[in-house]
């Protein structure tokens, strides 16, 4: 395979990746976007394998062994990925994404160490000679970004999973005195050891720099509360892209550079958009300021006992069936209960009675960007019934009934009414403006931000307690 053909195929794969991002920007074209992404990755993998075979053939050594190891790794890794992806529940998708980010970061670190160990094998320098200074900078950047991505993603995985008792994996932020100063000193030390590696190409400063980067990844993520996890997932996605791009420069691989840059830039843009949706500074989220405040107020919010108006699924069904307009606000509780199909059945029955049914999606609903959109798409909810927050917020004053399913912080009026609230200024779905509000939750426990929700105590609000799937199924039966 000639280098001109390799370049052409890499360009074709890059075009596919760009089309994938374009397709994923809209639910209607998301399937095509995924198809483009898979096609681009297949082209990139096959082209890289062909390039490796060409180079090994030219060297005349190790072709069979090297190709066997490569194909074995592809088969094993692909089988594990397919097995895990097929078994993962929709509610566990954010953890899977965080786990994948960690592997990308670790891969970048491993490749960097291989390059530093044998730069001649990658064509960066003749055997026994030192690497050019430019390659040392690329390896330094790729390594520390990859290390931070790996350890930070592991912590994010633990926080999202909620299965582990280890304090670092708890949803509440882990804060301590002087944490920002410690992070700053570690960052300076990491850069200092990176500079030593740059001038000497010695192993010791490179290893110490990597260890500090692993520690920084942990320390950056642990102060961030659970409410900010969607932003963290997006941020780590960006980091993994930049790590791949940095290693791409070292390997002189244009495909890695292009793909990594696309992932890094798109992840950074998405993180910025989500921070705007939360009315938070991107740097305050990274430093854990929002999470710390939310965690501090969690205890006071959890201890507050106020009366609420409770009702049954039959009551809710009667109110929905007699309304002219209904807006449904889905949240993470809907995903946990896997109630999207039952919800689709309920809305079909309401539509059959002439009720105008719409869905309102908050940008950070769920535990990763687009979580609710994917959930509704899985149940084949029509795309023209699903509206983003800014497109539907102006209609709530005329809505008869709002049905909130498992959502909490994204409908909390305290964001607009309490300037001292940790979520003050955060744009919310204006469910409180509707004539009647029905809220389904398992209990009165605080949401992911650890805050009490004033919406639940309004006179217009009726709480229906129980598992979302069971409650919605009971509503369907009552509406028959």
Image (tube, rainbow, N blue to C red):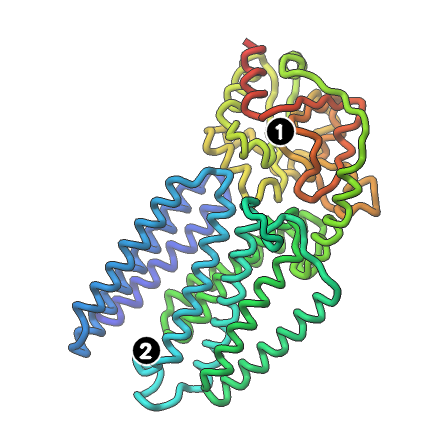
Res 357 → quadrant: top right
**Viewer-proximal residue among 295 and 395:** 295
Which residue is drawn at the image coordinates 66% and 42% (left, top)?
448
Res 116 → quadrant: bottom left
Percent x, y of residue 360:
62, 33
Give the side of residue 220 with respect to residue 123, left or right: right
Assess whether mark 1 and mark 2 are in contact (beta carbons under 8 angstroms): no
Percent x, y of residue 6:
27, 67
**Count of numbered circles in the view:** 2
Q: Is residue 372 above or below residue 122?
A: above
* Residue for badge 2: 122
Q: Which dot marks residue 74?
A: none
- Alpha-carbon distance for marks 2 and 1? 54 Å
Percent x, y of residue 277:
67, 47
Quarter of the image with the N terminus in it: bottom left
Give the side of residue 235 with respect to residue 126, left or right: right
Give the side of residue 401 with respect to residue 336, left or right: right
Which residue is drawn at the image coordinates 62% and 44% (left, top)?
364
Quarter of the image with the C terminus in it: top right
Percent x, y of residue 474:
57, 15
* Residue for badge 1: 405
Q: Is residue 466 above or below residue 171?
A: above
Judging from the image, what secondary structure is the residue with disc 2 in?
Answer: helix
**Viewer-proximal residue among 419 and 211:** 211
Res 235 → quadrant: bottom right
Furthest residue toward top: 480
Category of crowding for the residue at label 1, using alpha-carbon neighbours closer than 10 angstroms: few (below 14), some (14–19), many (at least 20): many
**Viewer-proximal residue among 60 and 211:** 211
Judging from the image, what secondary structure is the residue with disc 1 in?
Answer: strand
Which residue is drawn at the image coordinates 63% and 12% (left, top)?
314
**Viewer-proximal residue among 11 and 148:** 148
């Amino acid at each position: 395979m000639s280098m001109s053909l390799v370049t052409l195929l890499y360009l074709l794969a890059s075009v596919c990746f760009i089309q994938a991002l374009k397709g994923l920007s809209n639910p209607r074209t998301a399937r095509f976007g995924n198809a483009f992404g898979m096609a681009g990755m297949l082209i990139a993998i096959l082209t890289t394998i062909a390039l490796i075979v060409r180079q090994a053939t030219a060297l005349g050594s190790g072709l069979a062994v090297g190709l066997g190891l490569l194909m074995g790794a592809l088969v094993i890794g692909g089988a594990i990925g397919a097995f895990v992806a097929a078994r993962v529940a929709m509610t566990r998708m954010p953890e899977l994404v965080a786990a994948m980010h960690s592997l990308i970061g670790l891969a970048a670190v491993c490749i960097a160490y291989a390059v530093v160990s044998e730069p001649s094998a990658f064509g960066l320098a003749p055997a026994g000679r030192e690497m050019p200074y430019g390659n040392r900078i690329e390896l330094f950047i790729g390594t520390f970004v990859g290390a931070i991505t790996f350890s930070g993603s592991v912590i994010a995985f633990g926080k999202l999973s909620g299965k582990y008792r280890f304090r670092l994996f708890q949803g509440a932020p882990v804060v301590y005195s002087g944490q920002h100063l410690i992070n700053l000193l570690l960052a300076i030390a990491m850069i200092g050891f990176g500079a030593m590696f740059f001038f000497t190409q010695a192993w010791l400063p490179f290893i110490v720099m990597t260890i500090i980067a692993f520690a920084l990844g942990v320390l950056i993520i642990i102060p961030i509360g659970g409410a900010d996890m969607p932003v963290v997932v997006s941020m780590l996605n960006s980091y993994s892209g930049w790590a791949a791009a940095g290693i791409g420069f070292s390997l002189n691989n244009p495909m890695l550079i292009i793909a990594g840059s696309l992932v890094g830039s798109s992840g950074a843009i998405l993180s910025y958009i989500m921070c705007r949706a939360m009315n938070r500074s991107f740097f305050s989220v990274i430093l854990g300021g929002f999470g710390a405040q939310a965690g501090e107020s969690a205890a006071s919010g959890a201890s507050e006992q106020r009366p609420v108006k409770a009702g049954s699924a039959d009551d809710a069904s009667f109110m929905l069936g007699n309304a002219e307009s209904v807006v449904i606000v889905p949240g993470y509780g809907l995903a946990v209960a896997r109630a999207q199909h039952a919800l689709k059945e309920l809305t079909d029955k309401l539509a059959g009675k002439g009720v105008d049914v719409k869905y309102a999606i908050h940008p950070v609903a769920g535990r990763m960007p687009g979580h609710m959109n994917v959930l509704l798409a899985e149940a084949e909810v029509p795309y023209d019934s699903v509206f983003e927050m800014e497109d539907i917020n102006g209609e709530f004053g005329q809505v008869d009934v709002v049905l909130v399913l498992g959502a909490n912080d994204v409908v909390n009026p305290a964001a607009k009414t309490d300037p001292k609230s940790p979520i003050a200024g955060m744009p919310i779905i204006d469910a409180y403006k509707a004539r009647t509000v029905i809220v389904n939750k398992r209990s009165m426990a605080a949401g992911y931000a650890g805050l009490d929700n004033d919406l639940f105590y309004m006179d217009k609000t009726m709480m229906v307690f129980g598992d979302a799937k069971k409650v919605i199924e009971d509503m369907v039966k009552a509406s028959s």
